[in-house]
Amino acid sequence: MIIVLDFGGQYNQLIARRVRESNVYCEVHPYTLSVDKIREMAPKGIILTGGPNSVFEENAALCDKELFELGIPVLGICYGAQTMAHVLGGKVATAPVSEYGKTTLDVDTKAKLFKEVRGTSICWMSHTDYIAEMPDSFKNIARTENCPVAGMCDEEKNLYAVQFHPEVVHTEEGTKILRNFVLDICGCKAEWKMESFVETTIENLRKKIGKGRVLCALSGGVDSSVAAVLLSKAVGEQLTCVFVDHGLLRKNEGDEVEAVFGPSGPYKLNFIRVNAQERFYEKLKGVTEPEKKRKIIGEEFIRVFEEEAKKIGAVDFLGQGTIYPDVIESGLGKSATIKSHHNVGGLPDYVDFKEIVEPLRMLFKDEVRAAGLKLGIPEHLVFRQPFPGPGLGIRIIGEVTADKVRMVQDADAIFREEVARAGWNTKISQYYAALTNMRSVGVMGDGRTYDYAVALRAVITSDFMTAEAAPLPFELLQKVTDRIVNEVKGVNRVLYDCTSKPPATIELE
């Protein structure tokens, strides 16, 4: 096992993801985890993550010096490297030149950490402070033009530190570097597989839930579907799945979800459908601010679940399909809040359940899909389009109305139909139509129109933490545009969003 000690940076779970890609079990814990507890857990290695803080701050997040005296290999990344240097007697200072983004890196290829790594390659930097002086026993093993100590080590004590981010895909040799640490330096065996996660999670759910009853928030999306099947295998009849049709689903999606998970579907789940369209529309009336919309939708979901739980009687747990990008973007822990996901940062202060269980909380989207396949969920469900819990409420810029929902549903259905017809549905990770709050003048049938603009969005990504805009053929975009303008009442203009993530997010709100 590898333990990742989390200092609150945006990329922290990517480290655990890369370790798991090496088929090594990994757990993420806060940096405050005690040395005694770490000793008890007996990990093969420890990784210190990046974070938004500085070692100079009052009450700075720092490791106990004893951590580096356990005889366990440690790798510090970015802020983790700085805290290692600071605690062990080195000097951290504000860098004369901050480094952000792709940077040319030179490494000492004789160092164990850089075995079979190219001497010069591109890495991903994101720092304002830097290691000005190394601790006495350390040697310099990497550098960039503006960062003289981009890597350092004490090989006798198996202590390593890098200022750059090997976990990010933009670091060309990052996977090799992490594998060198995990497999060679820590001596881990590459034996952990997704089957292990599924088996362990089911067993842990049984222990946690015991004889309690669980209400699972089932949207029919990939995440909630995998969570529901995991819970079903763990506790069987103790589980009830509640599907809330909040009127913000894609066209015909409510009926499609019921067909799969309802009484006539392949899964023997206790399934309840709640049609709450008007209730949500009323709550969203006049609301335009994205975070407020998300929180209203999140709270209303919970209130519906609470009401259904009372009808069922004595429900102890609320099960959700929360995944790690939801947690990171919602700003839990020390990360900055990007947007509140309805099942994380959108939760109200008071929730009338004993506990919330989130079996997928530490996984990325592609890992959730892999878990779904191991659980025997059909491929067409596992690889269906992702859809956010707040639904079309965050694909409509500004106030949400039933008429705007109708426009987005119709435009989105056309877009999805034409993408699939052109064979692009298997090449892109997520695609949808959104309604902007912009109205513009057009001309149709020799008459003036003053209608809305639809924005099309399509991205390619593996983990949904970063994404690139998909290069859809212009002929396809033109066909979609012609159909939307001709078939969707109230729309007279279509735009294509070419922005990557970052700086944008995948959803518009």
Image: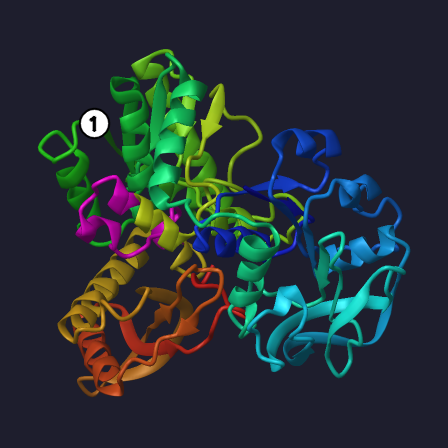
Q: Residue at x 37, y 69 (%)?
A: 459
Colour scheme used in the picture?
Answer: rainbow
Please provide percent x and percent y for residue 401. 35, 52
Helix, strand or loop status at disc 1: loop
Please provide percent x and percent y for residue 286. 46, 50
Left or right position of 310 against 29:
left
Quarter of the image containing the N terminus?
A: top right
Name the kind of residue labelled 1 in the image: Leu
**Residue 259 belongs to the span the image colors magenta:** no
Q: Residue at x 76, y 55 (%)?
A: 156
Q: Is residue 247 visible?
A: no
Left or right position of 404 against 424:
right
Q: Is residue 270 above or below residue 287?
A: above
Give the residue pinned by disc 1. 269
Q: Residue at x 43, y 60 (%)?
A: 464
Give the quadrant of residue 107: bottom right
Please provide percent x and percent y for residue 23. 43, 50
Q: Nearer the viewer, residue 202 or 280?
A: 202
Instruction: Tally the marks.
Output: 1
Q: Nearer the viewer, residue 66 or 347?
A: 66
Give the quadrant of residue 85: bottom right
Q: Is residue 128 visible?
A: yes
**Residue 380 belongs to the span the image colors magenta:** yes
Q: Residues within 10 Å of mark 1 (few under 14, many from 20)?
A: some
Please provide percent x and percent y for residue 335. 64, 51
Left or right position of 40 against 420:
right
Q: Nearer the viewer, residue 288 or 212?
A: 212
Q: Residue at x 23, y 28 (%)?
A: 272
Q: Is residue 165 above or below residue 373?
A: below
Left or right position of 4 against 133:
left
- Which residues lie in the magenta part? 372-393
